[in-house]
Amino acid sequence: MKTQLKSLIILLLSAAAVFAQPPDTLWTRTFGGFDADYGKKVIQTDDGGFALLGYTFSFTNGGSDIYLIRTDASGDTLWTRNYGGSSDDIPGGFCQTPDGGFILGAATYSFNAVISDYYLIKTDAYGDTMWTKVIMGDDEDYCTDICPTEDGGYILAGFSSSSASAGADDAVLLKTDGNGTVEWIHYYGGESSDKAYCVRRTSDGGYIAAGESGSFVLYDPEAYLVRTDANGDTLWTRSYGMPYYYLQDVFDAVLETDDGGFIAVGSSCSFSFGYFDIFLVKTDANGDTLWTKLYGGEWDDAGLSFAAASDGGYIIAGTTKIVEGPFNDGYLVKINAQGDMLWTSAYGGSSEQNDDLFYSVIQADDGRYIIAGHTDAFGEGNYDIWMVCLEAESVYVENRLKTTPQLCFLYQPYPNPCNQSVNILFNLNAPGYVRLTVYDLAGREVGKLLEGNYSPGSYRNTFDASALSSGVYFIRMEAGDIRQTQKILLLR
């Protein structure tokens, strides 16, 4: 049955290739030293460059260190930083903060950790540490992802076997304020092992988490979604898979869709009955399955990340095995909104003894696909962090013209410095949805100037800063997928 299914997938792939080819590779970059270095996540920064998060054994204070790399738009290194203590420190996720810096969520075995503890690092725009927080439990606590919240704080996902959990591990969501102080923590699961690998905000102010659960199935873990309100209280949970021995299913990423439902990606051997395939599930707002899709070749394939594409489809990044054995190639699958495959491509060294993996993918503002992972086929060390850039697909340009302002510009506020109020000017050359917000130096939202649909033209808004104390603040403009920031200095 497995062979027949795989033959059908390969046949469909061959047919699809007639109509769509993968975009050309524009450039690749590797980062690291002579030891092993691993890439986990990539984001685009406000200036159009990129930031990569991983961990390093080449540049370390002991064990593995968390490794942050900033590049320009061409992938050339601007700076690198490593963070950690005398033992292993493992990254979970990160995002850029309104002040241009970064917040990193991780797990640490350093700093007198009880097995492992949650670890938060706040940096400035140059990667220099502003503050760190170690959040300790009484057993293993592990952070796998982090996401900003509407109130300027952060939501962490992970898993824990501390005494507050119900089983071997519980999936965890942990909410902090903008300074990393814990506001609440919730555990999800039962007596077996349950883990969350990804968290995202939902349009109603709550959260959706994706991972795996062994508590609510008969045998091996199934893919798992947890939806909560803004306080982390459970609205619903769902498991996805087949109740058989040795047939594991997992979700590694989840996104909310325009219809209020969700789409999640991971890997499954339930439906392929043997080797793993990339597993994609589309649900309604209640988590009930609308459709599922499998993608892959003859051996193991996994979907580890995905991103919404400008044409309404999705780009999936993960791994594929070209032959049976322990070695992987990086793997991309492009699909439309209904999950139909448009193209696939594998990336890696020419040798069947190379291990190359993709862990993260985004679509940049100009339509290029940026992928991060690690490779032992290229670079200097045992493994190196690996960044691949693909050209934009032609459909992107047409879609962008329809949906996104082609040019917006946030001017320097005046007067600056100011002591009472400041004038904010911006220009919009196409209709679009605009949001103008003020943040303090810690990344907390302290004022919302405007939000809504605007016609092309020039606009001025006056921000009353009389209620704020002296200090540095940031005006942030969001128009479609374009983001610009200006700094103001308030003096009393």
Image (cartoon, rainbow, N blue to C red):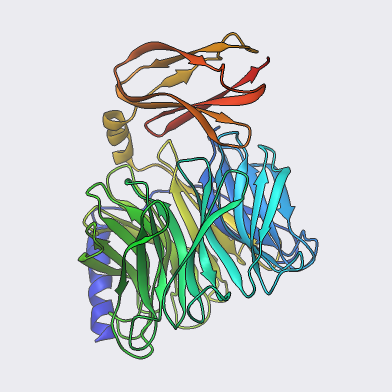
Residue 169, image x, y percentages: 51, 77
Quarter-wise, where is residue 426 in the image?
top left
Which one is in front, 406 or 249?
249
Residue 291, image x, y percentages: 20, 65
Residue 192, image x, y percentages: 45, 83
Quadrant location, the C terminus: top right
**Residue drawn at 36 percent across, 88 percent down:** 219
Looking at the image, which residue sits at the far top?
Answer: 415
- Residue 332 visible somewhere in the drawing: no
**Residue drawn at 55 percent across, 60 percent down:** 373
Which one is in front, 315 or 441?
441
Q: Is residue 250 above or below residue 313?
A: below
Which one is in front, 435 or 38?
435
In the image: residue 198, left or right of residue 138: left
**Residue drawn at 24 percent across, 59 percent down:** 339
Quarter-wise, where is residue 38 in the image?
bottom right
Residue 152, image x, y percentages: 52, 40
Q: Is residue 82 above or below residue 34?
A: above
Quarter-wise, where is residue 198 in the image?
bottom left
Quadrant location, the N terminus: bottom left
**Residue drawn at 66 percent across, 70 percent down:** 116
